[in-house]
Image: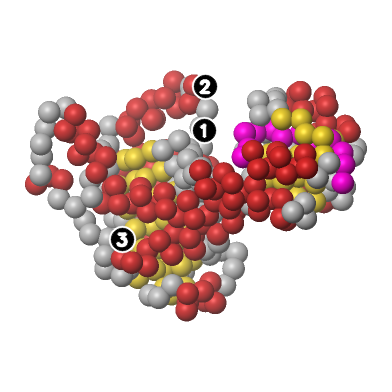
Amino acid sequence: MSGKIIITAPVHSFLLETLQQKGYQCLYEPEITYEALHAIVGDVVGLIVTTRLKIDATLLEHANQLKWIGRLGSGMELIDVACAEKKGIQCVSSPEGNRTTVGEHTLGLLLSLMNRINSSYEEIKEGHWLRSSNRADELTGKTVGIIGFGNTGTAFAKMLQGFDVQILAHDIYKDVSSFKNDFGQMKPASLQEVQEQSDVISVHLPLTSLTRHYVNDDFFKACLKKPYFLSTCRGAVTDTFSVLHALQNQWVKGVGLDVLENEAIQSYTTEEQSLMNELYKFPQFILTPHIAGYSQEAYLKMAKVVLEKLAII
């Protein structure tokens, strides 16, 4: 094997070393811009990408020698897969590589919310030692609705097995009944059943035209038990203004997010910054910077999965 590959994001050294050992010429450009990539992609046979750059039809039409695109992580919304496939370009992703850490991070957000870990620590730093107002909710025995029962949804369900919870699994793309024997107290559920019966709702959906703002005001209003709400998938699946409305109107007990619609926080408009400032006022709101799938272990596993799917190892 030979040819030029552009690596457009930070990667584990295993990936770079393996490609070089297989005879590829690797251009390691983790900060490359779309314009710079477009200028040099003409003679490239492979691309390694994450969520930083859009691989659209304009760029693909210029990539005359491109044979494959390897996506580190899950979600292909920034890649024009249809255009790539028309040109005979293989597109692979690696959700198997970071699903475990996403499941663990989702559980961490939930336990922090239910046990008031983050909010009570903030109070202590301000000189307040408050016990009664920080009485926890136990996870054990609760009903957890998981919307999207793919790689990360099932990983979260696996993490919940020690808590004796009832899992309601809803997926708009697949029949989840085949998973029943793998997760103990799990049953397929409609969206309405998830909204009406769940103490916790966690969303694990890809971003498509069908799922953009899937979680909105109407979604939260239909949640009868004022659940804890979690999202570690794609920011635009959830309307950020609706998150604020849900907290203001007590449609939820708490919200844990690892993603936002706009994660370039340095570029925020006055309106966007005002929205976030309002969210920050709520102690039952937790936000992490899109790190749910970013563990040390996942860093290596995603590289291995991409290389395996491309038949390079």
Q: Residue at x 49, y 21 (%)?
A: 266
Query: Left or right: where does residue 96 sit relative to residue 127?
Result: right
Query: Left or right: where does residue 312 sit relative to residue 77?
Result: right
Magenta stretch: includes residue 4 = yes
SS for dot 1: loop
Decide: is 224 above or below 58.
below
Q: Residue at x 83, y 41 (%)?
A: 23
Q: Residue furthest front?
A: 21
Of residues 5 and 285, the one nearer the viewer is 5
Decide: is 9 above or below 228.
above
In this rendering, does residue 21 appear at all? yes
CA–CA distance in space, label 1 to label 2 = 9 Å
Magenta stretch: includes residue 311 = no
Which quadrant of the figure has residue 126? top left
Q: Which residue is mark 3?
A: 199
Q: Residue 231: where, in percent of width, then height?
A: 44, 49
Give, as a three-letter code, the residue at label 1.
Asn
Q: What's the magenta region?
A: 1-12
Dot 2 or dot 3: first in sequence order is: 3
Q: Which residue is mark 1?
A: 262
CA–CA distance in space, label 2 to label 3 = 35 Å
In this rendering, does residue 251 appear at all? no
Q: Residue 168: where, in percent of width, then height?
A: 41, 68
Give, as a three-letter code, the residue at label 2.
Ser
Q: How crowded is the residue under tag 2: few (<14 C-alpha within 10 Å), some, or many (20+)?
A: few
Tag 1 near tag 2, CB within 8 Å: yes
Of residues 21 and 254, the one nearer the viewer is 21
Q: Which residue is mark 2?
A: 267
Dot 1 or dot 2: first in sequence order is: 1
Give, as a three-letter code, the residue at label 3.
Asp
Q: Assign the C terminus to one quadrant of the image.
A: bottom right
SS for dot 2: helix
